[in-house]
Image (cartoon, grey):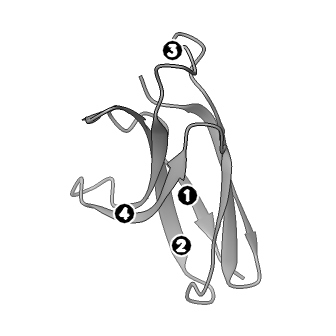
Amino acid sequence: MPPFNVTATADNNSVTIQWQANASLSQKKVSGYNVYDYDPASGQKDLLAQLPHNQFVTNISELTFNTQYTFAVTSLQGSKESAIGYPVSVTTH
């Protein structure tokens, strides 16, 4: 199951992305998280960060000024990856 309460906050040309672990998954079962630049229209996703199971925030920097981005976070259980559940969009400034 994907993480939930995903938020994205823009500051200058970077974005801070935060999320909460899905309560139905024991943290012992989650091995990590992937953060993607995501295009909901095409379903294309580009991996931006791979994070450990106990990290629930990351900063993506060097983004283009005044551009809308959509980010998605998935959870990992070993080699299995959750679906994208809660993409968020934000415009850099």
Q: Amino acid at mark 1?
A: Ser
Q: Marks 2/4: CA distance?
A: 17 Å
Comes first in the chain, label 2 or label 3 = 3
| Mark in the foreground, 1 or 3 | 3
Comes first in the chain, label 1 or label 2 = 2
Q: Marks 2/3: CA distance?
A: 31 Å
Dot 2 falls on a residue whose secondary structure is strand
Q: Position of residue 80 (x, y in %)?
A: 27, 32
Give above or below for 12 relative to 16. Answer: below
**Tag on residue 25?**
3
Give above or below for 41 relative to 24. Answer: below
The residue that appears at 45% across and 30% down in the rendered structure is 2
The local crowd at label 2, few if under 14, some if 14 to 19, many if 20 or more residues have their Cα within 10 Å, is: few
Q: Amino acid at mark 2?
A: Gln
The residue that appears at 51% across and 14% down in the rendered structure is 25
For the residues labelled 1 and 2, say whether their Cβ atoms are less than 8 Å apart.
Answer: yes
Which residue is nearer to you in this view: 25 or 79? 79
For the residues labelled 2 and 3, say whether their Cβ atoms are less than 8 Å apart.
Answer: no
Q: Which residue is mark 2?
A: 68
Q: Which residue is mark 1?
A: 89
Q: Which residue is mark 4?
A: 47
